[in-house]
Amino acid sequence: MTTVSSLPDPQVRAPVPRGSGGLVDRHGRVATDLRVSLTDRCNLRCTYCMPPEGLDWLPKVEVLTDEEIVRLVRIGVEQLGIREVRFTGGEPLLRPGLPGIVAATTALAPRPEVSLTTNAIGLSRMAPALAEAGLDRINVSLDTLDRERFKQLTHRDRLPDVLAGLAAARDAGLTPVKVNAVLLRGINEADAVPLLDYCLEHGYQLRFIEQMPLDAHHAWTRGEMVTAEDILARLTAAHTLTPDVEDRGAAPAERWLVDGGPATVGVIASVTRSFCGACDRTRLTADGQIRNCLFAREESDLRTAMRAGADDEELADRWRVATLGKLPGHGIDDPSFLQPSRPMSAIGG
């Protein structure tokens, strides 16, 4: 196979021998944050993600087993310098083996920080087991506190379950509990301030995320997107926001102190204020594909090689090669930009 050391590139300062080195791309960025999609299935139908009838789910035989996921995560941690692991979906709480996967991950050395992004349906039941497995914290997707609007956005009447899941995560010590919200023009823009007030009251950390071109029906248009500036304008009508001077590093959210702090609110301006130059993420899909960017149109298949008998060193080398090809940015502003063929539910957040 082709290894990192056999790929000519003048921007790589030194060759990387087979079986050594982390996940470094041609622009000098180092991936230390791994996002792992555990399933493409979801029990909500958020309008910016998938149609009401759902999608064609991956066949079970194509989805990585619990043991295969743990093996690839272990290779990432032990050989490739991964220091943070985030389990996503689809909806990861639908994965029956989730607590065991978390426990195996937190048992690795060096121990990575382990978190979970979820819609929180079922979290009120599972939070204690996840905490016992060693999960560090939770991110919950919640776009409105209005029950009717929640039904409109998700095609499900499950808002009470989400709020109960948030409280259970806090009570189980899975903190800081973070809330991720997407605002859609003409639908839930008015929820910006109520969401912030709710999170301030309950001790959750709120982050707004600009809607990205990752919907299954490819209906996203930049002109209809609620931008970071729009979000901040709404928030500052009710609260005093002061830029947080703490270095954000590779974190995607710009943060503001709310009414002098210490509480903060974040905005992830993936489209209008891209942070690609500091990106430290790599992604593993539920069917064993490595994606070096959320918006990548190419993937690198680890599942086939693994099931054909590849050893850990070969899989690590394949992962390194996949990382080398990472583009300098997502290119959304480029006229030639094409949306990924997979929607967010199949990629993993």
Image (cartoon, helix red, strand yellow):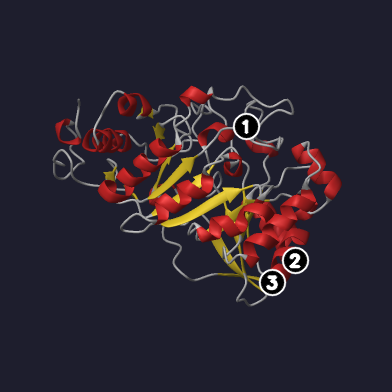
Precedes in sequence: disc 3 or disc 1:
1
Q: Where is residue 299 drawn, in percent x and y?
A: 40, 28
* Measured Cα–Cα span from mark 1 to mark 2: 29 Å
Q: Nearer the N terminus, badge 1 or badge 2?
A: 2
Residue kind at label 2, given as amino acid type:
Asp
Label 3 SS: loop
Residue 86 in sight from this viewpoint? no
Q: Earlier in the sequence, mark 2 or mark 3?
A: 2
Could you classify mark 1 by the number of other residues whose Cα lies within 10 Å: few (under 14), some (14-19), or many (20 or more)? many
* Residue in the foreground of this view, choosing between 158 and 15: 158
**Side of 8 where 201 appears, left or right:** right
Q: Residue at x 58, y 34 (%)?
A: 345
Q: Tell me how far mark 3 sits from mark 1, CA to CA.
A: 33 Å
Figure check: 135 above or below 310:
below
| Placement of the N terminus among the 4 image quadrants | top left
Question: Which amino acid lies under the numbered mark 3 shown in the image of this protein?
Answer: Thr
Q: Position of residue 126 (x, y in %)?
A: 62, 53
**Residue at the right extreme of this rendering:** 148
Q: Residues within 10 Å of mark 3 (few under 14, many from 20)?
A: few
Determine which residue is flagged by label 2: 197
Q: Which residue is mark 1?
A: 215
* Residue 132, percent from left and from top: 52, 60
- Against 80, is 206 above or below? below
Q: Are the residues tagged 3 and 1 within 8 Å (C-beta)?
A: no
Say which of marks 3 and 1 sits in front: 1
Q: Type of residue at label 1?
A: Asp
Q: Give the alpha-carbon distance from disc 2 to disc 3, as whole Å.
A: 13 Å
Residue 193 left/right relative to 22: right
Q: Estimate the x, y position of residue 58 in percent, counting from the top left.
A: 54, 24
The answer to which quarter of the image holds residue 213 is top right
* Location of mark 3 (residue): 240
Task: Please tell me which residue is depicted at 14% across the width and 44% down the height of the picture.
Answer: 14
